[in-house]
Amino acid sequence: MFGFEPSDEQKTLVKSVRRFAARELRPLAHDSDERGELPGALLESAAPLALLPASLPEAYGGFGQRSAVTGALFAEELAWGDLSGALALLAPGLVALPVLLAGTEAQKHELLPAFCGEGYVPASAALLEPRADFDPRVLQARARRVSGGYVLEGTKCNVPFAAEAEWMLVYASVEGESRAFLVRRGTDGLHVGEREQNMGLRALPLYKVELRGCVVSSALCLGGEGGGVEAVLGASRVALAALAVGQARAAYDYALDYAKSRVAFGEAIAQRQAIAFMLAEMATEIEAARLLVWEAAWTLDQGADGTRECLLAKTFADEMVLAATDRAVQILGGHGYIRDHPVEMWLRNGRAFAVMEGIAIV
Amino acid sequence: MISFEMPDEIRERVDLVRGVARELMRPAAREFDEREHEIPWDFVTRMWDLSLKTGQSFRSGTRRDGAGVAAQALVHVIETLSWGDAGIYLCGPGAGLGGAAIEATGTAEQKQRFLTRYREGPPKWACMAMTEPHCGSDTAAIRTTAVRDGESWVLNGEKIFVTTGHKALVDSEGLMVVWATIDPAAGRAGMKPFVVEAGTPGVRVTKLERKMGIRASDTASVVLENCRIPAANLLGSAEVSDPRKGFKGAMATFDATRPSVAASALGIARATVELLKELLALQGIEVRYDRPRHLLTAIERDLLDMETQLRAAWLLTLKAAWMMDKGLPNTLESSMCKVKAGDVVTRVTQKGVELMGPLGYSRELPFEKWMRDAKINDLFEGTGQINRLVIARRILGYSSRELK
């Protein structure tokens, strides 16, 4: 049967995440963006949501089961609150979920229990590379086979929490095929560079990372010798598309409220078709993107090859979020350009989606 | 539950019509486009037999079925038929839009009396007449009048753009649901739907429109001159007290049929994308979903974009139908899918012509026809603009007075 309604369990979860996003994330978003950092307490405050433990089975210390659909619902709500905060809260999943999805049994037992405790466990992934023609399936970072392991060489960018992360999942090419390696903090040859300064996502600590003769043992290659990263890339695309939906919805909600209260020529500007139609199109596009995300996530949950669905969802969401956040600024007019309103920040954040891959996973 | 698993009931219904689309529609598409208004009897007979044999309507699905997937099955069926040919699909026999209006506004007795004919005997059609020469989107401005005279209503006025009007009133023992006002001073509240059966004195088809596309489908002008119908042919109640009731019935009809229009649009869009991919593949152009984006050519990007937009519109359509099956109000979702599908099919088919170059423009290939057929979906049953208005009022909580 087709179904377009979250289960009761998912609805309860969405409600609690929505409350968290409204109470904890949204009020801090503006100052965090201005200061360029997230308050440490924020990351700890999300512990009761049990983002990760709910996705990890008991055998590895969790109490649930991973579902990309549930994860997508979760991500949308978090991003509605604040995209930088959402990405920070999801960051531990950058290591834990690939291990769960594609790791060996030994890797699961070694790494996953640490993510099931109370505190926030900084973790990271290094997928992006600083070049215009970046593609996750054609990486320039190389992993050269040596006896007992691999030597990693290359440059990565937009690596969240690189300085703090206990574990970093580093993506590199092994003879032309993308693979991932679990690299522990302090490993020789892993150089965390300067904090990056970006257009948006300013509160999220992102770093450049250099790999210079970084040696990792075979046991730390995700999934062992034959391990691939396709499943991880798909889940990452779904996550980013879901976050885009949340970001767009935030902008839409704000613009809609503004348009109803702002009076021009004797009536609310929302009473003019020029504004009302923009809102109607935003609502339609957001809903369409959400359904594409759900379908892609559902496909992954079926264990089927979701390459096409994930690509469609991300392709659509990337454009949608940019258009929606841009429209929100437009609806606020000159006020939209002023940093007192959040819409300009959302437009800056929204621009990230089309250039980002692999910085979130559900 | 969030699920995208197609139930067997739907799969079976799609299987039933896929062969029809492939064998009786696609090969005949050009012929019936050029012969404008000629009835594709092979198709009509096959569809009529199928619906009699299976007890399922392939034209309207507002009635709940046992599995609770009637509307979802219908959008799948329509998408498939329209993939075969949109013009011929619109010639499909059955209760169609007229039936949807009866389902949305009629009493149980009226549904029985008017719709039984669509489950027996020779093929029949039903149509709905709303638009008048002086008013289209502004449906509340209709001037056709209905005056009570003893046990009858007497109708007078002129209707245009009546899809399948000729087939419903002239070619078969069908019927027309006509919207008329019983109190011109009452505005929307006075608008009521009436059933005029084929053969009723005083109803005349005066013209068939010559159109850009969907030429196989007849678009009729109908004149009502002292057309006398039984009092019991007024669908629902004659009460004028509720200021929104009459108009509401019209809108409820559209809630049910807009997903069908969207589905038909998307059938054309899929046909375009499929043939385009097939022909371009012969020239070595293929979309590879795992290919780095920067390595895609402009044409591959266009194809990927078309597929993405098509899927987005389809999921909106499916959701609107799913809500109908669940008995949930779906005005917002119906208009959303209609807007999106109208935009997508227009863009996709125009792009189809463009990407094939002179071949796309030639009548030897179907791309130009699909582009002509597609455009109607952004126009009928609410233009893209009217549906944006419906969406905007819903999301803003505005009345038609607050947002004009």
Image: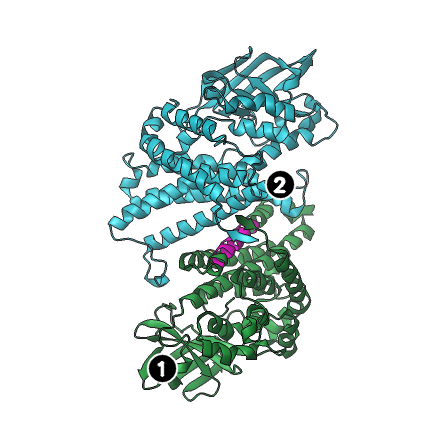
Name the residue that disc number 2 marks. B327
**Magenta stretch bounds:** A283-297
- Residue A200: percent from left, percent from top: 53, 69
Question: Which image quadrant for residue B31?
Answer: top left
The answer to whether residue A178 is above or below residue B334 is below
Looking at the picture, tell me which residue is in the foreground, B6 or A190: B6
- Residue A328: percent from left, percent from top: 58, 56
Dot 2: within a 10 Å radius of its alpha carbon, few (fewer than 14), some, or many (20 or more) residues? few
Magenta segment, prevailing SS (helix, strand or loop): helix
Identify the hue of chain B.
cyan
The answer to whether residue B133 is above or below residue B321 is above
Amino acid bearing label 2: Gly
- Residue A303: percent from left, percent from top: 45, 61
Identify the hue of chain A.
green
* B222 left or right of B353 in image: right
| Residue drawn at point x = 33 percent, y = 30 percent | B28
Q: Magenta stretch: residue A294 in it?
A: yes
Name the chain under label 1. Answer: A
Name the residue furthest right.
Answer: B241
The local secondary structure at tag 1 comes to strand
Name the residue that disc number 1 marks. A153
Dot 1: within a 10 Å radius of its alpha carbon, few (fewer than 14), some, or many (20 or more) residues? many
The answer to whether residue B262 is above or below residue A36 is above
